[in-house]
Image (tube, coloured by chain):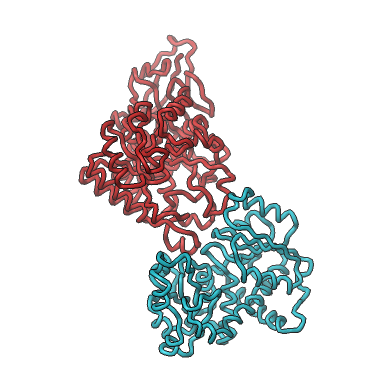
Amino acid sequence: MSLSSNHLLGLKDVPKEDIQLILDTATTFREVLERPIKKVPTLQGKTIVNLFYENSTRTRLSFELAQKRLSADTINFSKSGSSAAKGESFKDTVKNIEAMKVDMIVCRHESAGIPKYLTQISNAKIINAGDGRHEHPTQGLLDMYSIREKVGRLAGLNVCIVGDIGHSRVALSNIYGLQTMGANVSVCGPSTMIPWGMEDFGVKIYNNIDKAMAENDVLNVLRIQLERDAGVLIPSVREYHTYFGITQERIQKNNPNILILHPGPINRGVEISSEVADGSSQIILNQVTNGVAIRMAVLYLLGTKSEE
Amino acid sequence: MEILLKGLRLFNPEQNMDINSDILIKDGIIEKIGNVDLSNHSGIKVFDFSSKVCVPGLYDMHVHLREPGGEDKETVISGSNSAAAGGYTGVACMPNTNPAIDSAEVVKFITDRAKDHLVDVNPIGAVTKGRKGDALAPMLELYDAGAVGFSDDGTAVKTASLLRNALEYAKMIDSPIIEHCEDESLAGGSMNESSISTELGLPSIPTVAEDLIVMRGILLAEYTGGKIHIAHISSKRSVELVREAKSRGIDVTAEAAPHHFTLTDECVRAFDTNYKMNPPLRQQKDVDAIIEGLQDGTIDCIASDHAPHSIEDKELEYIYAPNGIIGLETQLSLTLTELYHKGKLTLGQVVEKLAINPRKILNLEIPQILEGEIANFTILDLDIEFKYDIKSSKSRSKNSPFHGRELKGKSIAVINNSQIYVDGQFQNI
């Protein structure tokens, strides 16, 4: 079994068989992570560059750890801001890195489309670690993995993504992946955070969190960008929490069995109360562990795939 | 010096002219229209233009020549060469140069650069000093130096009060204020706002950012009695606003760029920065509205918004790449292919949009195909089919999304200022 593509740019148009294969492969690696010796020699001799143009802590750590667990040689490149402002163009940077003979590039960039551009200017296999507001496929995969691990299935589940959908790359990857796997996906947030044309994506839109909770099996709660959004997209953090915050009281009232996911980092008392965060901590922290397993699976499947 | 152009169809809707005839040109002036007995003309150069169409020289009222300040991207001369190659005998160049065209010296610098060229270059002056939106530029002085209109193109005039005063002030010289219609607080994105921008995760510019400033311009033109010209109109609602304003007798005119009637935001899926422009590529409903606006006269003319950018600038990440594409050499062919050959516009309408109306808007003399007049023509081959190759471009920049596109119809020669451009060469005549 192998993936149908040489790259993972997003979950849009990724076939069900590929997602299934990644999730199943991750299960194997999840088991490896529980062993006393957590390292396998699978990608020995492969060179992977983590090209991070935008700040990231957990995604980068997760990818780095996954690479080390698979015995790959890794190098890290960090840069923030426009490449032009720093003198060297993005293309030149990539060409230079490629000249060092790398097999794979894991890229995070604030401009949407950069992973696709990388496939045009590089021969390496490309993994998107988040591009602009576009996609963050490994996050989508690990969210699906975590749901499947907890509930046992994805098909037929009602999953609602809550928060700033418009500025989120996690939302789109979740929507595409979950829909492919047969889940019913909806979004919930204040109307300023629901992007233009959302209805064209085949998702139900809620502006009422109580209703969303009552009608869904799973909530995937996105982080609210405090510094950026308050006063612009929402009047205040307080108002957001009052009308959209996930509290224990709301869970009890609307749906005591609901599963709460959060891709992190958590703003306690904003999108989710401390009580809920701690109550759901097992699955939220499990998401982090699963993230390593998912990234191992993706790196392994792409890294060992022979080029057609 | 004498040249004879043989076998032409002379076509000028402004003169109700559509005849087949030869033209004799002497020292750049039309000497004779009709049959010419060659025995009396020794040393005459003869061009066989059988079944080609001679129309008034085309005029593009919205180009960026980048000089002074951006000579790596384009110069007055390279841009004029590109214009000639595209079938144009005149262009109006926008003032977002460095320094901006906000003083008589810069106007004269540009006209001096262009003075020996076949292509007429008419600078557009800035509305405000340095295009900064703080204070009016010396509009009368700019006009006297040769500016034919005023614009802060690249952005809208910053405040309604400045636009109001500019419209009032420009009434003294009957000049239009050319508005780049974009509300700053709503704009700032990389593409049109639609479900596609949501899908691609790119920051977006809603059509209402354009519509608001179009409406502001119309209302202020109505209030002041000034002349407003809407640059590169791109949204359906804006076309409706202009149509309604015209029906009420407000002095508003509008132009559309070829990419806004040939491409949609679907193209952005390629993440190719040659599809990044401002206003952005819109949706099919907007494209249809632009074509309808061109058909019913709501949109007066077609202008390229020729915007050269270097390869290194355009190769930036999508959100950082500058807006704009070159267009002088594809504009005529796109108009003929997509509008004339598809029956959307008649040849008469094409000539009005490409040659006559832009000059009317800028109060420039319209070339006549008459004995005794200056020979200022474009010679068209309406039916030639070819594939556009960016490598053939005379512009210093190569940022075009139309490379490889199949086109039908182009200019094969232009004549103006006692020169002919034919077969890729300028010759004095």
Q: Nearer the viewer, residue A192 or B399?
A: A192
Instruction: Tell me: residue A22, above or below residue A7.
Output: below
* Furthest residue toward left: B248
Q: Colour of chain B?
A: red
Q: Nearer the viewer, residue B12 or A228?
A: A228
Image x and y of residue A238, in percent = 41, 75
Left or right: B389 with respect to B24? right
Query: How many labels sit on residues?
Result: 0
Image x and y of residue A102, in percent = 73, 60
Q: Is residue B51 visible?
A: no
Left or right: B219 with respect to B11? left
Q: Nearer the viewer, residue B63 or B349?
A: B63
Instruction: Tell me: residue B28, above or below residue A234.
Output: above
Image x and y of residue B236, in percent = 34, 53
Q: Nearer the viewer, residue B394 or B15?
A: B394
Instruction: Tell me: residue B168, above or below residue A81.
Output: above
Q: Colour of chain A?
A: cyan
Left or right: B236 with respect to A107? left
Image x and y of residue A73, in percent = 76, 66
Residue in view at x 29 percent, y 35 percent = B170
Q: Which image quarter: residue A240?
A: bottom left
Q: Is residue A269 visible?
A: yes
Instruction: Tell me: residue A263, above or below residue B389.
Output: below
Residue in view at x 57 percent, y 68 percent = A136
Residue in view at x 49 percent, y 68 percent = A225
